[in-house]
Every structure is written in C-alpha cells, then in structure tokens.
Image: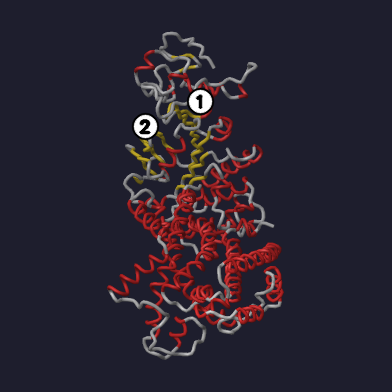
Amino acid sequence: MFSFIIRRVLLVIPTFLAIAFLTFVAIRLVPGDPVEARTGERGISPERLAHFRHELGLDQPVWKQFLDYLWQIAHGDFGTSISTQTPILTEFTTLFPATLELAICAMLFATILGIPAGVIAATRRGTYIDYTLMGAALTGFSMPIFWWGLLLILFFSVDLGWTPVSGRIDLLYYFEPVTGFMLIDSWLSSEEGAFASAVSHLILPTIVLGTIPLATIARMTRSAMLEILGEDYVRTARAKGLSPFRVVGIHALRNALIPVVTVIGLQVGALMAGAVLTEYIFSWPGIGSWLIESIQRRDYPVLQGGILLVSGIVIVINILVDLLYGVLNPRIRHAR
Amino acid sequence: MPLLEINDLTVDFKTSGGQFRAVDGVSLTVDRGEILAVVGESGSGKSVAMLAVMGLLPWTATVSAKTLAFDGRDLLTLTPRERRKLVGKDMAMIFQEPMSSLNPCFTVGYQIGESLKVHLGLSKSERRKRSIELLEAVGIPDPERRLSAFPHQLSGGMSQRVMIAIALACRPKLIIADEPTTALDVTIQAQILELLVSLQRETGTGLVLITHDMGVVAETAERVSVHYAGQKIEEQPVAPLFADPHHPYTAALLAALPERATGKHLPSIPGVVPGQFDRPPACLFEPRCRFATDRCRTKVPPRQGAIAGFALCHYPLTHGRPIGHPHPEGREVAA
C-alpha cells in the first residue's frame, strides 16, 4: 500500500511537466500577447512595445522562457499577475474557496441524487420508471452547460423570481471571511438572513454544475447494479431471508460503489472544466471567472499558474479516490 | 406430515422465444432428518425446483403447484415478508459456486452474523460467540482469526465450509445443497460431503442434495429422486435404485457410470436433453430411449406405482427388462 502511494506520487511529476508545457505553448499560440492586450486599440510605439516585452521576458526564445518558468516553479514561485501585480498564489487562495464550495455542493447534489436514481432504475429495470430516469439522465448528460444555465436563470430567476441571478450573496450583507466558504461564513456571522441568501445564490449554480456528474453517476450506478444484482452472492443474501432493502442497499450497493467511486473521481476533472463555465454564467467569483479573464488579458502567469494549481488539486483528489477504492474493495487492500 | 411437501410443482420462464417450462409437474416430499438426493443432468430442472421452494427465482419465473408446504405452512399463500422469516432460518440453501457465493466486500464474521442478527436478534457478542462455534463445527481452524477474513482470502473448500456455517447458523429444519461439491477439488469434495452428512446427523435436519454425481448419491443419500427435462421420472430408496432401476433413463444413467463400464469405450446416453423448441409431444425421454415405441411417441406416459419406483414410463423396467413391451430386447441406439 505504501509503495503504491509513492508510485502514484512519483507519477505526478511527468503529469505536471506535460500540463505546464501544454498550457505554456497553447496560450502563446493565441494571437496577441499581454502587452498588446493591455494597450488595446490606442496603439503603442514599437520602442515601448519592445521595452515592455523585454521587461516581461517575452523577447526570449520560447524554449528559454519555458525553462525559466520551470525553474521558477521548482522554487515554489508561481509568479505574479501581469494585470494586477498580485502573487498568483495569493489570488488563487483567495478565489479558490468559492470554487471549492460550488464544486463540493455540485458533487454532493450529483452523488446524493445520482446513486439512488441509479439503484432505483436498476431494480426497476425495463419499467417506465427506469426509462424515465435514464431518459432524464441522458438529457442531462447532453445538456450544454451554457444553455442549461441560461434556461434555469430565465425560468427561476427572471420568470419566477425565486433565485438571484448572480453572485454568492446579496450586497446587503458584509462580514469578514473566516473560512472563505460563504455558507459557513454567513452561518457564523450575526447578520440575519445572510445564510438564506447564500443558500439561494448557490442553488442554481449547484444544479447547473452538478447535472452532468449527476447523469454520469446515475447511469454508472445503474449499470454497475445491474451487473451485481445477477451475482451469486446477491442470491446468497436473498437466501438468508434478508429484506430487499438489505439485499440491494447493502450487499449489492457496496459492490456496485466500487466502479461508481472511480467515476466520481474522474468527474472531479470534468467538474473543474464545468466550474469555469458555470462561474462565468453566474458571475461566481471563483477561479473559473479568474481564468477566463486571464485569457482575455493574455495574462500568461495567471493562466499557467492557475491551471497548474487546478490540475494539482484534481490529481490529489484522484489519488484520494484511488485510496478510497482500496478502502471499499478488500481485494485491492490486501494485494501487495 | 412431511417436512417439505411439493405436489405438482410447475415453473415456467418467460423467454424471448415464449414460455419455457423448466419444472413440469414435480412432486416430492422430504421428511425430518432425511437425506433426499435429487439427481439429473444440467437442465433437468432440479435446481429450479428447489429455488422455487426457497422463493429465489427471478421475476421472469411463474411458479404454480397444488401443494407447496414447509413444516405445515403453505408457502404459496405466505406474504413475501412472512416467507423471508422462514428462508435463511428454517430452510437454508448452499450453492454450487462457493467462491462467488460469498460477498467479496464483507468479512466472514459479518456474513455469518447477519443471519443471526436478522432472524434471532442476537447481540454483537452473542453473534461472535455463535459464529466461532459454527466455524468450529464446519472444521475451520483458528475460527476467531477467520472471522475477520474476507472471502478472497479463503480457498474454495474453506468458502464452502463458511457457506455451510451460514446455512446452519439459525439451526434450520431443512438444508438444500445445490451441487455443493461440483466446483471443488476431488479431495475436498469428499471432505465437504462428509461434513454435510455428519452435521446433518448431529442436528437432525432434513437435507436435499441436488447433484448429478451418482457416486455422491450412493455414498450419502437415503432416497433418490431422478429428474429429466423438468420431470421427476423415478423415485426410490438408494439401494433398490442402484440394484434395480425402473426407468430406462435411470438405467442408462447408471450404466454410464465409469465404474460399471466393461467395454473399451465408456457407455453414454445418445442425444441431448430436449430444449425449449424440440420437446417431444409425449414421453420426453423417448428420442433417447432404446425401448421407445410408437406408443411412447404419441401417448403421455403414466406414473407407475411404488413397486415400479414411481417411474414415468409406459414400460417400466424390472431387472433390466421392460414390462409389457412388444420387443423386450429393445433396439440398439446409435451413440
């Protein structure tokens, strides 16, 4: 088990290098650079353009810039934002809790609804309940996030006026962030109605971000359950005279969860991609909006550092999921 | 009153090709403390009949019977909840594949203790004590340590011992063992059979042993019920059955035992068990029977009396000769 963890951690290094390289090259393939993006349409004299480019090191060959960047990263320095002059790590740690809060809520939403939906569809296989659930899952899975978000805003925020359109909390409330999680901070604050406001702001983004993971988890749970329900040990459980709830909910589900947990882990990566879009739609002040803005400003250090940090988190979560897999599956736990 | 009474049990499966009759009018009884062997090839409906008794058939199956009674209770009219109180407590089942019959995610202790908790409501320490007793009874060394073992850490023989322990947990009145030794090594097979029989003697439970192994039958059973293509075709106590089989199928089955082979080639029964689409109209064994006549092809055979082993045959055998047959020597059937 210990060597397994070491192996997994060592494998992270080439992954990181590849991610750093890809983002580094990709952003430079986009027309324009940070200096041009800042001057806008007013224009700038060629001398000053060259001066700024030299200051930012953009006049160096790309391979040299990349090696310099790696050297910098190796020393734990993610650089500073060109547009705000703030260290990237500081910006990231300020904005990340908002994204994390949204992602956790979306994942809880997807898991809490997805697993029971999959179990119900599997145990009612071939009935209209199964078809309805799986039809809904397929629709949810195919729904473009942008369009789905706008639809929900139009219906719930504009037509019904039930939920706010954007942001994390009403502007009426102000309190010092303690954890960075709006739900917890508003709960801790003495402001009346702050918590309710934070919850109402979270509902639509959670649904939008959680829909695709929900659909994926429901479908995966269904197919895993269908396979497990035909296993001999499920028959053994029934032969013990256990209630259908115990047979399905304990004996079968425990085994079906093994592939489902893997899928949940894989969803974390997709969730980060979805978070970028969702945050943009709902003006959610997290790293998603931050990254999109950095693309528009050609803020190379923010984009490179931000993506590297996000991938780092996705990788860590995937390692944790692998460990959880071992907890769920005794055959893995005992393997040497 | 017998412990288990099955009268005219029929099980149909809905398949894409229409109805398939897996069990066709089977009647059986099992007395308390008795070992009944149910014998037949694959597809003879022996397992399905017993799964119907346990209530473990999938929803595609339709079960009907004149009587299906266990310990004086009519299984057909019980609600699912009432039935679950019997199953696993008063009647238990052991399956063919021990390695896949135990849940890989739970420890041996949990899987034994579960029945004790659900049916007897034992406390945690009582469950542990009883589980250790049970593992000792089925001959598992170091039972206390084994309680925390997972199924993948056990061999096939060990797993089957655990399955037997689970079956015995609530001191059942009837144990149904569905080919309990088929998936095991030959050396382990004998041990498991011995264990089953000795535990059955100690506890006085009824035992239904489903098997296709005539050797197993000869060693363990008291009474034998022979099944073919979903029908019971003969039933006799074990010694007379081996000495004087009355149905041509039983006779052919016994003649096919390697121990009884005299010639150069091992004898076999030509043909295969009829399936869903090639069921003969009258006697189901007729296409493979060396004594078959036109009568066998057109008229459903009658059930003979106890003297003729309840054989389902127009011409039951006595000492190898068909009674009332126009050509008692029979014909050679090409193998």
Above or below residue B102? Residue B1 is above
Q: Chain of mark 1?
A: B
Q: Position of residue B167 (x, y in %)?
A: 51, 49
Check the picture and name the quadrant holding the N terminus of chain A.
bottom right
Q: Is residue A223 above or below residue B48?
A: below
Q: CA distance from mark 1 to mark 2?
A: 22 Å
* Front of the two marks 1 and 2: 2
Q: Position of residue A335 (x, y in %)?
A: 66, 56
Tell me the quarter of the image containing the C terminus of chain A. Answer: bottom right
B217 or B25: which is nearer to us? B25
Discs 1, 2 touching: Cβ within 8 Å: no
Can residue A1 be seen? no
The circle on residue B241 is: 1
Residue A319, placed above or below residue B277: below
Residue B126 is left or right of residue A151, and the answer is right
> Is B163 drawn above or below residue B4 in the view shown?
below
Q: Looking at the image, which residue is at 62% across and 45% down?
A: B157
Q: Earlier in the sequence, mark 1 or mark 2?
A: 2
Which subunit holds the residue at mark 2?
A: B
Q: Label 2's element?
A: strand
Q: Quadrant of residue B295?
A: top left
- Residues tagged by mark 1 and mark 2 found on one chain of the structure: yes
Category of crowding for the residue at label 2, using alpha-carbon neighbours closer than 10 angstroms: few (below 14), some (14–19), many (at least 20)? some
Viewer can see residue B133: yes
Q: Residue furthest left?
A: A159
Secondary structure of the residue carrying numbered label 1 = helix
Where is residue A274? Give x, y as percent.
48, 67
Q: Amino acid at mark 1?
A: Leu
Residue positioned 40% across, 53% down in the render: A123
Q: Position of residue B102 (x, y in %)?
A: 55, 51
Q: Tag 2: residue type?
A: Gly
Residue B25 is marked as 2
